[in-house]
């Protein structure tokens, strides 16, 4: 069974069709066999039972005629009133009777020899034996009647004896007739029964074949619908992910239980979806890293000069339409000494500590940039110079009081300026630079506005 699931789809469908066709083949074979049987039975009825039924009718007629004859002879006792003499009348009667019985014997003998009698063959033989016996009784009766008539002994007593013997013959004939009738009736019932069986079984088998066909069709359609549905869902998933540039949500990857063309296709598609999902995730990660590299300073993590230029241009654009903003330029005091005294590595640590401290204090809208060396800038949107100076003073104080283990204390000087109409990137930066220069030359660890 397990192997069957692993064969190709074409072989699966072919297998199911072979099952269905085999079933239909059996149904057809059964029908042919049953039809032949019924045909043989119909032949038997036509060749045996119909002639026998006709003979039964003829024998009944003969019997009636014999009764009439006997009655005539008995009542009249005068041979002149009937067309034939009694012995002639009985001989004619006997000949007719014998002819019919001989015909019946021929039909039965022929059918028994040809093995056409399928039903109750022994009973047919019994009929033959009864007919034979009747012939003997009839011959004996005829002899006695002939003798009695020749000796003219046809008195009442004699007629009563003949009547009794004729009644015995009658009974024999009646027994044969009833036997024949019973057999023909049972034969037709037997044929009817076979026909009904044939109809019933064939209808049942036909319905079974139909049910199997319908089941197989729906089974195959269901398999296709499920599998193709899953493949379509995966393709849709991939399409959405490609359109949105997002990794594929929950890409399932289940090892297929059985192998055929569709499961292999499904499996390949899932592999492709998984790889695509990984590639999209990797690409996003790389894009994120590139973005960080392009906009952030590697040492401190603050935004770099490139980002500063971009943000400053944007802020200038907004300010030209009526906005306001300030910038603060800040520089570590005597940083060269830190480097010289504690080493370049400690100098780096100082820059990192400064960045971390400033970043903690900034508002969400403010941004810190490292412009180069130990020089930093803060962009303060919607801030006038007074507020910006107050904020810069706060930052300066906090840096001055900063104590970081293994790092020397350090201070910063800050130059603050506000956007002024007609400002561009260079002019506003130059003004801030001049303010910083002033702070440096005024003793450092100071905030100056420009
Ligand atoms: N450790 C370290 N030092 C740097 C880095 N960038 C620049 N410097 C050093 O910073 C020092 C700046 O020195 P100066 O321009 O003379 O300024 P200063 O010593 O801070 O003096 P003032 O600014 O006048 O207070 C130089 O010695 C540079 O080598 C850096 O990324 N790391």
Image (spheres, helix red, strand yellow):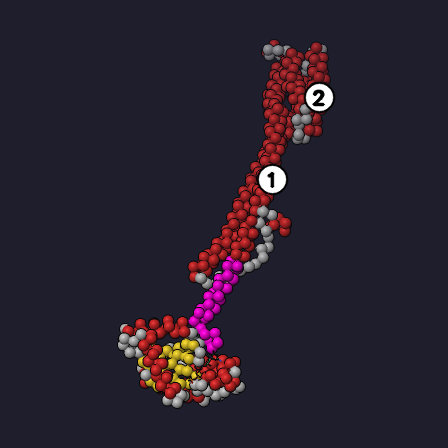
Quarter of the figure with the C terminus = bottom left
Asked if disc 2 is less than 8 Å from ligand 1, the answer is no
Give the label, 2 or 1, closer to the camera: 1
Q: Is residue 375 left or right of residue 155?
A: left
Which region of the structure is painted magenta? 273-301
Please tell me which residue lies in front, 64 or 33.
33
Q: Quick one: label 2, few (<14), some, or many (20+) residues within 10 Å?
A: some
Whether 88 is drawn above or below 269: the answer is above
The residue under the point 49% across, 56% down is 234
Q: Position of residue 166 (x, y in %)?
A: 67, 21
Q: Which residue is mark 2?
A: 132
- Is residue 393 at least partly visible in the picture? no
Q: Position of residue 124 (x, y in %)?
A: 68, 27
Estimate the spatial distance between the alpha carbons at disc 2 and disc 1, rounded to whole Å: 53 Å
Please tell me which residue lies in front, 132 or 241.
241
Q: Quick one: label 1, few (<14), some, or many (20+) residues within 10 Å?
A: few
Quadrant of the displayed image that contains ligand 1: bottom left
Q: Position of residue 121 (x, y in %)?
A: 69, 29
Q: Position of residue 272 (x, y in %)?
A: 52, 56
- Check disc 1 and report its element: helix, strand or loop: helix
The quarter holding residue 332 reads bottom left
The quarter holding residue 84 reads top right
Dot 2 or dot 1, earlier in sequence: 1
- Is residue 119 at least partly visible in the picture? yes
Q: Is residue 246 magenta?
A: no
The residue under the point 56% across, 52% down is 264
Secondary structure, magenta segment, majority class? helix
The residue under the point 60% across, 39% down is 22
Picture disc at residue 22? 1
């Amino acid at each position: 069974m397990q192997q069957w699931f692993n064969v190709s789809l074409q072989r699966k469908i072919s297998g199911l069709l072979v099952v269905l066709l085999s079933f239909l083949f059996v149904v057809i074979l059964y029908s042919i066999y049953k039809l032949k049987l019924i045909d043989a039975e119909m032949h038997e009825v036509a060749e045996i039972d119909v002639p026998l039924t006709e003979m039964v009718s003829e024998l009944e007629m003969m019997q009636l005629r014999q009764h009439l004859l006997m009655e005539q002879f008995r009542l009249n006792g005068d041979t002149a009133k009937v067309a034939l003499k009694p012995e002639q009348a009985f001989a004619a009667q006997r000949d007719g009777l014998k002819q019919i019985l001989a015909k019946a014997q021929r039909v039965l003998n022929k059918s028994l020899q040809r093995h056409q009698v399928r039903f109750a063959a022994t009973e047919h033989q019994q009929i033959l034996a009864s007919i034979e016996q009747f012939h003997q009784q009839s011959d004996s009766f005829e002899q006695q009647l002939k003798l009695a008539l020749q000796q003219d002994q046809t008195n009442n007593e004699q007629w009563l004896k003949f009547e009794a013997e004729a009644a015995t013959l009658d009974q024999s004939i009646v027994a044969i007739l009833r036997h024949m009738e019973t057999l023909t009736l049972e034969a037709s019932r037997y044929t009817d029964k076979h026909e009904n069986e044939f109809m019933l079984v064939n209808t049942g088998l036909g319905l079974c074949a139909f049910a199997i066909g319908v089941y197989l069709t729906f089974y195959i359609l269901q398999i296709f619908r499920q599998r193709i549905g899953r493949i379509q869902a995966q393709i849709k998933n991939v399409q959405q992910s490609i359109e949105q540039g997002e990794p594929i949500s929950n890409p399932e990857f289940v090892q297929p239980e059985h192998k055929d063309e569709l499961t292999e296709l499904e499996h390949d598609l899932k592999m492709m979806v998984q790889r695509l999902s990984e590639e999209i995730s990797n690409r996003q990660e790389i894009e994120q890293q590139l973005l960080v590299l392009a906009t952030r300073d590697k040492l401190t993590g603050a935004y770099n000069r490139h980002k500063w230029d971009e943000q400053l241009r944007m802020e200038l654009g907004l300010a030209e339409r009526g906005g306001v903003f300030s910038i603060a330029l800040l520089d570590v005091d005597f940083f060269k000494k830190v480097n010289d005294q504690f080493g370049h590595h400690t100098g780096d640590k100082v820059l990192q500590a400064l960045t971390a401290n400033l970043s903690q204090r900034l508002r969400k809208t403010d941004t810190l940039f490292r412009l180069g060396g130990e020089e930093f800038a803060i962009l303060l949107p919607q801030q006038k110079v007074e507020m910006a100076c107050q904020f810069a003073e706060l930052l300066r104080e906090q840096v001055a009081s900063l104590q970081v283990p293994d790092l020397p204390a350090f201070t910063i000087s800050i130059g603050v300026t506000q956007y002024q109409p007609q400002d561009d990137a260079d002019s506003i930066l130059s003004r801030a630079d001049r303010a910083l220069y002033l702070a440096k030359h005024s003793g450092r660890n100071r905030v100056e506005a420009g």
